[in-house]
Image: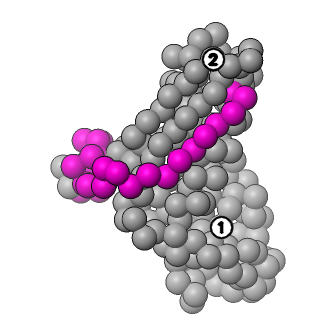
C-alpha cells in the first residue's frame, strides 16, 4: 500500500467520473502502463495520470516521445501513430488498445506541410465511461508526433468488439492462448 503524499484528482474505472483522493489515502498500484497508474482504493478502481506520479512517490510515468524529425511520408506517420497507440492501455486490462484489437482505423493524409490523422477505435464494453479518457489520451499522443497537424479520434461501436479481435500476443498475455 502507498499513502498519497498529496490530494489528487483521479478517474473512476470504468465509469470515467472524476473524484478527489485525499492526501493520506491508501492506494495499491495494480497497473503502471502507458504513462498512467491504475490504483485500487477504498473508493474502488481509479486511474491516476502520470503528471500526478509524485503523489504516489514515483517518478513521472512519461509517455513515449516521438522522434524529433518530421516524417517524410504518410506511411511513416501511420507507423508512428500505431506506435503511440501501443502506449495507450485499457485501465482494467494490462494490454494496449492495439493488441486488444480496439483500433479499427488509422488513416493518415498529407495536409498543409504536415499530416491529418483519423483514428477510429472502440471499447471492450459499450457502456464503459473510460471512452472519453482513452480518446483524449490517444489524441494527445498522436498530436505529439512531429508533423501531425490535426488528429480526429473517434470512438465507434460498429462492429462490436469481441475477444476474437485480440492479437495472439494479447491472448497469450491474458492466459487465453
Please tell me whether mark 1 sits on a helix, a strand or a loop: strand
Characterize the local packing of mark 1: few (<14), some (14-19) or many (20 or more) Cα atoms within 10 angstroms: many
Q: Looking at the rendered structure, which numbered label has been put on residue 110?
A: 2
Q: Where 177 sits versus 28, above or below?
A: above
> Which one is nearer the viewer's eye here, 56 or 167?
167
Q: Quadrant of residue 55?
A: bottom right
| Residue count near mark 2 (Cα–Cα under 10 Å), binned few <14, some 14–19, many ≥20 | some
Give the mark toward the camera: 1 or 2: 2
Q: Could you give the CA–CA distance between mark 1 and mark 2, rounded to whole angstroms?
A: 35 Å
Q: Which residues are magenta?
A: 148-175
Q: Is residue 123 visible?
A: yes
Which type of secondary structure does the marked residue at label 2 adopt? strand
Furthest residue toward right = 6
Which tag, 1 or 2, sits closer to the chain's start? 1
Image position of 167 (left or right of 9): left
Question: Where residue 124 sits in the image (x, y, percent)?
Answer: 37, 60
With 132 as the anchor, is 156 left or right in this view?
A: left
Residue found at x 34% / y 51%: 158
Q: Which quadrant is home to the N terminus?
A: bottom right
Residue at 72% across / 25% down in the picture? 146
The residue to which callout 1 is attached is: 48
Quarter of the view holding residue 150: top right
Q: Is residue 112 above or below residue 30?
A: above
- In this view of the protein, can residue 13 be seen by the observer? no
Q: Is residue 174 magenta?
A: yes
Answer above or below: position of 91 versus 13.
above
Image x and y of residue 127, in percent:
42, 70
Amino acid at each position: 500500500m502507498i499513502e498519497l503524499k498529496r490530494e489528487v484528482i483521479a478517474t473512476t474505472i470504468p465509469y470515467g467520473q472524476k473524484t478527489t483522493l485525499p492526501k493520506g489515502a491508501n492506494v495499491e498500484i495494480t497497473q503502471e502502463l502507458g504513462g498512467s497508474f491504475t490504483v485500487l482504493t477504498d473508493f474502488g478502481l481509479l486511474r491516476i495520470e502520470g503528471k500526478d506520479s509524485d503523489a504516489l512517490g514515483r517518478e513521472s510515468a512519461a509517455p513515449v516521445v516521438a522522434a524529433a524529425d518530421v516524417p517524410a511520408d504518410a506511411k511513416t506517420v501511420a507507423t508512428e501513430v500505431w506506435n503511440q497507440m501501443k502506449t495507450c492501455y485499457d485501465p482494467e486490462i494490462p494490454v494496449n488498445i492495439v493488441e486488444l484489437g480496439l483500433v479499427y482505423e488509422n488513416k493518415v493524409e498529407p495536409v498543409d506541410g504536415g499530416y491529418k490523422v483519423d483514428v477510429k477505435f472502440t471499447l471492450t464494453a459499450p457502456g464503459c465511461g473510460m471512452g472519453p479518457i482513452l480518446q483524449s489520451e490517444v489524441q494527445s499522443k498522436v498530436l505529439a508526433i512531429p508533423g501531425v497537424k490535426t488528429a480526429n479520434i473517434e470512438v465507434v461501436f460498429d462492429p462490436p468488439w469481441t475477444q476474437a479481435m485480440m492479437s495472439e500476443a494479447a491472448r497469450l498475455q491474458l492466459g487465453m492462448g
